[in-house]
Image (cartoon, grey):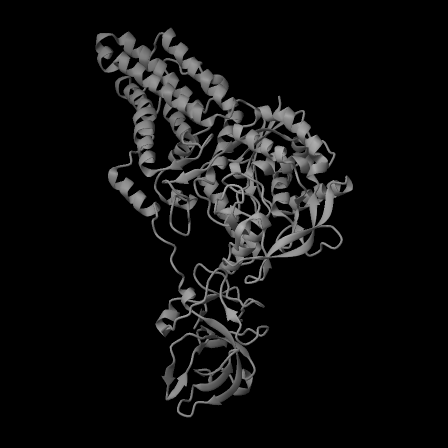
Amino acid sequence: MKKILITSALPYVNNVPHLGNCVCVISADVYSRYQRSKGEEVIYVLGTDEHGTTTETRALKEGLTPKQICDKYAKIHHDIYKWFDCEPDCWGRSSSKENATQTVDIFKKLEKNGYILEKELSQAYCEKCKKFLSDRYILGECPFCGYGGARGDQCEKCGKLLDPEQLVKPKCNICGAKPIFKTTKHLFMDLPKIEPKLRKWIKKEEAKWSTNAKTLTQGWLKEGLRPRCITRDLKWGIQVPFKGYEDKVFYSWFDAPIGYIGITRENKKDWKDWWYSPKDTELVQFMGKDNIPFHTILFPSFLIGTGENYTLLNKISVNEYLNYEGGMFSKSKHVGVFGDDAMESGISADVFRYYIMVNRPEKQDTEFAWEDFTDKNNHELVGNFGNLVNRTLSFISRFKGGVVPKGKLNDKFIKEWKEYIKRITDALDKIELKKALREIMELSKLGNKFFQDSEPWKTLKENPEVADTALFLLANLVKDLAILMSPFLPKTADSINNQLNIKQSKWKDLGILSIKAGHKINEPKILFAKIDTKQLAEFKSKYSGGKEEEIHPLSKINLKVAEILIVEPHPDADKLYVMQIDIGKEKRQLVAGLRNYYKAEELKGKHIVIVSNLQPVKLRGKESQGMLLAAVKDDKVTIVEAPLSAPGSPVTAEGISQGDSQITYKEFKETKLTVRGKRIVSKETGALRTNKETLKVNMPDGASVE
């Protein structure tokens, strides 16, 4: 018996996954459940992709370290997939020590075998953010198709492989500034050198791939492969074990696919029996269309280049995009259903699983639409599938005392029934999940028609044998529907089995009339609830967006670093100082209530942070042309300092612009600045920083900054 190794593309941890992100995860789960039901030995691998600029940027935005941000979102992802009843055998993270070990091992073997090149690379650098940008954090127009949202590594619309310098009108995806390009040394995978071996492998395997995977892969090969950079100028990632590269890490798309092996290694002692056994193991991978080349070109090249006997890709199932109501999912604009939304919606996970799979974008993009979702729930799940199960079991319960009656065979009905089973099985073997699910629903329709034609409400008295035969056969059909539906709707299948008073049957039990006459069933229960027009309106209003992303209050504020030049007591106030400050191009006067907390000599020379566009006010006769920032908690006050930054240096958070117009103190208070991990943060932003440093203050979490 051949082992089956199943992977879903590792979702990135920079945000909460939306339903479109869940397509390949649920698809892989459906396929793994199907193979287990057939009795196959299966490992389903799932985890999170955690390295790269995206993580560093998100961490900065939330005032956390990259590890903390990964810990936070890895748990969110895990909890959401668990709610969706996805059951990976191996769950893990690309930032694990096992993946680092595996990645370094593969790199060293590639280097030893001559597949690693050292070349100079012109890399995008944002002068405003003061950092190198990963390819995915540079946006612009695609030079091939003109798509305006192309990334620096690939155009999602036409699928072309890109270099950042090819983009028309490139911009930093963090702050919007135009990046410059700096020349640095990097390590490359020599794809042209390994191309002959790769082509030979592709020719052998691609017949089992989905059409979109074959088309895009052949497009890459036709253009000719080029060396591909595998290192980046970042801090968060797996360190490169190569002299002169101590300050660089592996590009996330080098270590992320290797993460499948690392995660298996982390969870299974016999991981080598799966990843080093191509003759005994079939590798089946699920992903979205933007991930194709990384799995059909790059990852196989890494493994082939080691010269070791790795298990390589056999089957690949690639989904197109699931969009939302004619547009795109957007967390910031409140558009679409995200995993946490689904969990809080009151709708069961199985209903979402059904809609995602019956609407699976296998050959073209599809969309999630609430009216269609409601229609499929009410007419397909409630009106067809749920109706057959409930009317069959309710009839047995009500008119037969819950005991399955003795019936005869109906050859025509059983023949059609078994033909459906064959078509469903064939579709699942070919990973045509949408087709398989639709065939299951057609089989359910066949059962409903058989129930109607048998008219048990009449024949119970007029011709009991016809009624008993119908109920006997339909009880067994319901048993088969639970088996067929179990990969797609596991909780629904469990509920049916509980109502039938049987254990979960396996695929081999399909078509067998194993529920015998005299079997006692349990109390019938409704499987699915209708969604009414009021609920539909609420869902559309809550999730369909239309809201523009709100301007963050911090964007109204202009914060600058200032040096305190002179400090004098206020002549008419015991708690106030009058200070002369330098903010670079001008000098100003500030009045601050610090006499109870600092001596004058302690303040002189300090580099502080001020709100420079605050309307001037007079405090006891002395004008204050701004306000300094200080953290306050109980009776303790600590001023915010920027010791490494020059007077006049701007202070802001990642992705937040500075205000120009004067503001009132009330408007400033809307920012609600607080301390978290000694950093100063505001809701929905990262820590405040200059171009030299992140601002820190030695105060406990929750202290307000005012």
Q: Residue at x 45, y 75 (%)?
A: 612
Q: Quadrant of the C terminus?
A: bottom left
Depth check: give the residue in front, 477 or 63.
63
| Residue 645, horizontal then vertical, whole percent | 57, 73
Q: Is residue 458 above or below residue 155?
A: above
Q: Quadrant of the N terminus?
A: top right
Residue 39 visible in rendering: yes
Q: Residue at x 55, y 87 (%)?
A: 601
| Residue 490, horizontal then vertical, whole percent | 44, 30
Depth check: give the residue in front, 230 or 500.
230
| Residue 565, horizontal then vertical, whole percent | 53, 85
| Residue 264, horizontal then vertical, whole percent | 62, 38
Left or right of 189 on screen, residue 616: left
Depth check: give the residue in front, 264 or 61.
61
| Numbered label tally | 0
Q: Is residue 77 above or below residue 497?
A: below
Residue 513 visible in rendering: no
Q: Residue furthest bottom?
A: 571
Q: Is residue 461 above or below residue 679?
A: above
Q: Residue at x 28, y 40 (%)?
A: 536
Q: Is residue 391 above or below residue 648?
A: above
